[in-house]
Image (cartoon, grey):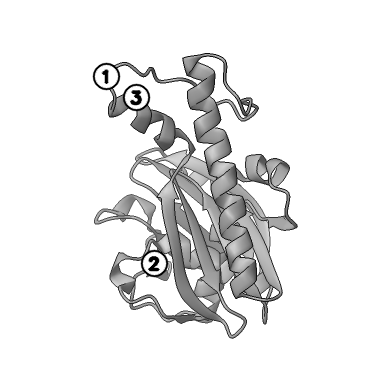
């Protein structure tokens, strides 16, 4: 099998992984502009895929190594029914493909808990249908602080009580219990719409949702990287 370097790049930070075929060898991260080749631990990638790079990605490309830059025109192993593929986040479609690889022929709801929380659906025929974009965990606290004159900016508290007894705990409850109620409601409605629904969660808040939601869910923190590797294999 060939060694693949998978790069999911943001404006500031980059998540990356090395794969040997379908097997993930290890994951690492680094800051844009940082010297990072020594993180490969002596491996020499034969192919590279780069996602979410914006306009500038010269610092992420190996010379003389075939590099696929993911775009809306890249061939995908599932059908994309999104009406505006040019506006679809690359992490969303990559996570959908990663989930499909794990649960083919099932209806899948993918919850990606990052800056925003996204809920995406792949049906049992392998068609990405789209989904929901909602405010993320910290965004809710920041919004209450920003759009009011007197509300403070509290820290995130995943164990916030249902009934707060001061302003801070009331805001924390609104953010935490609001997100959980939202997620539970969306899962319930999706289960009514799609039989045999498999719920998959990924992103930075995976452990929070996994521990708090009262549903059978599958946690896959590196789902986006897995999906990007599948796209690279599909285009091999």
Indicate which disc, 2 or 1, sits on the residue closer to the N terminus. 2
Instruction: Pick whichever, 161 or 68, lies toward us.
Output: 161
Q: Is residue 189 left or right of residue 217?
A: left
- Return the mark for residue 145: 3
- Return the mark for residue 149: 1
Mark 2 or 3: the one toward you: 3
- Return the mark for residue 64: 2
Q: Residue at x 45, y 33 (%)?
A: 138
Give the CA separation, mark 2 to mark 3.
Answer: 49 Å
Q: Residue at x 59, y 85 (%)?
A: 125
Q: Residues within 10 Å of mark 3 (few under 14, many from 20)?
A: some
SS for tag 1? loop
Q: Position of residue 135 (x, y in %)?
A: 42, 45
Q: Position of residue 21 (x, y in %)?
A: 64, 71
Mark 1 or 3: the one toward you: 1
Mark 2 or 1: the one toward you: 1
Q: Residues within 10 Å of mark 1 (few under 14, many from 20)?
A: few
In this view, which residue lies farthest toward the left? 55
Instruction: Pick whichever, 41 or 125, lies toward us.
Output: 125
Indicate which disc, 2 or 3, sits on the residue closer to the N terminus. 2
Q: Residues within 10 Å of mark 2 (few under 14, many from 20)?
A: few
Q: Is residue 199 left or right of residue 178?
A: right
């Amino acid at each position: 099998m060939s060694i693949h370097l998978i790069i999911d790049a943001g404006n500031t930070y980059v998540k990356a992984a090395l794969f040997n075929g379908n097997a993930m060898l290890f994951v690492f991260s680094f800051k844009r502009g940082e010297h990072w080749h020594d993180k490969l631990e002596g491996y020499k990638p034969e192919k590279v895929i780069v996602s979410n790079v914006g306009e500038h990605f010269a610092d992420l490309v190996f010379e003389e190594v075939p590099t696929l830059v993911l775009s809306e025109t890249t061939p995908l192993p599932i059908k994309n029914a999104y009406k505006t593929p040019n506006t679809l986040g690359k992490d969303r479609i990559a996570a959908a493909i990663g989930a499909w690889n794990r649960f083919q022929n099932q209806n899948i709801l993918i919850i990606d808990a990052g800056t925003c929380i996204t809920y995406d659906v792949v049906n049992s025929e392998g068609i990405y249908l789209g989904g929901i974009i909602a405010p993320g965990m910290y965004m809710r606290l920041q919004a209450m602080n920003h759009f009011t004159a007197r509300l403070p900016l509290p820290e995130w508290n995943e164990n916030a009580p249902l009934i707060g007894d001061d302003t801070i705990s009331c805001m924390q409850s609104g953010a935490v219990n609001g997100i959980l109620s939202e997620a539970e409601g969306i899962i319930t409605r999706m289960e009514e719409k799609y039989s045999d629904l498999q719920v998959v969660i990924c992103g930075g808040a995976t452990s929070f949702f996994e521990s708090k939601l009262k549903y059978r869910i599958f946690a896959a923190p590196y789902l986006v990287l897995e999906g990007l590797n599948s796209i690279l294999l599909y285009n091999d």
